[in-house]
Amino acid sequence: MIDDAYPVPFTIEKRIAPHTLVLTNRSGERLTALSFSLLGTGSLRTSAPLILDPGRQVRLVVTGQELPRRGIIVVRWFRPDGTEYLWRITF
């Protein structure tokens, strides 16, 4: 059985200096257990809430050299039905 496609619920606003990403929950769902991981070199700072309600935002500040070549952010969340999702963001 194939489920219907689920669109990524975020829009991203990228700012260059410092590398800042602002994610906005554009879905009508409350997203829970939200977490972020940086793969590659650098560091990631966020004051991310564990829950992101519709229309709310979270800001990620990433530092490191050659982020476009060496960095990937992985976003993890759960939908209201308990389904886990992962999404990767490149610079």
Image (tube, helix red, strand yellow):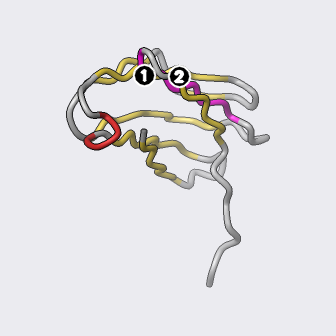
Residue type (three-letter) at the residue carrying disc 1 = His
Q: Is-magenta flag for residue 73?
A: no
Tell me what residue is drawn at x 42 percent, y 44 percent. Answer: 90
Q: Position of residue 68 (x, y in %)?
A: 35, 39
| Image quarter (top left, top right, bottom left or bottom right) of the N terminus | bottom right
Q: Residues within 10 Å of mark 2 (few under 14, many from 20)?
A: few
Left or right relative to 25: residue 17 = left
- In terms of secondary structure, what is the magenta stretch mainly? strand
Q: Position of residue 87 (x, y in %)?
A: 48, 49
Could you tell me which secondary element the residue under label 1 belongs to?
A: strand
Give yes or no for contact between labels 1 and 2 (Cβ–Cβ under 8 Å): yes
Q: Nearer the viewer, residue 67 or 47?
A: 67
Highlighted range, magenta: 18-25
Displayed quadrant of residue 7: bottom right
Q: Position of residue 6 (x, y in %)?
A: 67, 60
Q: Nearer the viewer, residue 34 or 55?
A: 55
Residue 47, disc? none
Residue under label 2, please give it. 15
| Image quarter (top left, top right, bottom left or bottom right) of the C terminus | top left
Residue type (three-letter) at the residue carrying disc 2 = Arg
Q: Nearer the viewer, residue 35 or 69?
A: 69
Residue 19, disc? 1
Q: Residues within 10 Å of mark 1 (few under 14, many from 20)?
A: some
Q: Nearer the viewer, residue 42 or 24?
A: 42
The image shows residue 76, relative to residue 46, as above or below, that is below
Left or right relative to 17: residue 7 = right
Q: Residue furthest right?
A: 28
Tell me what residue is drawn at x 50 percent, y 35 percent. Answer: 33
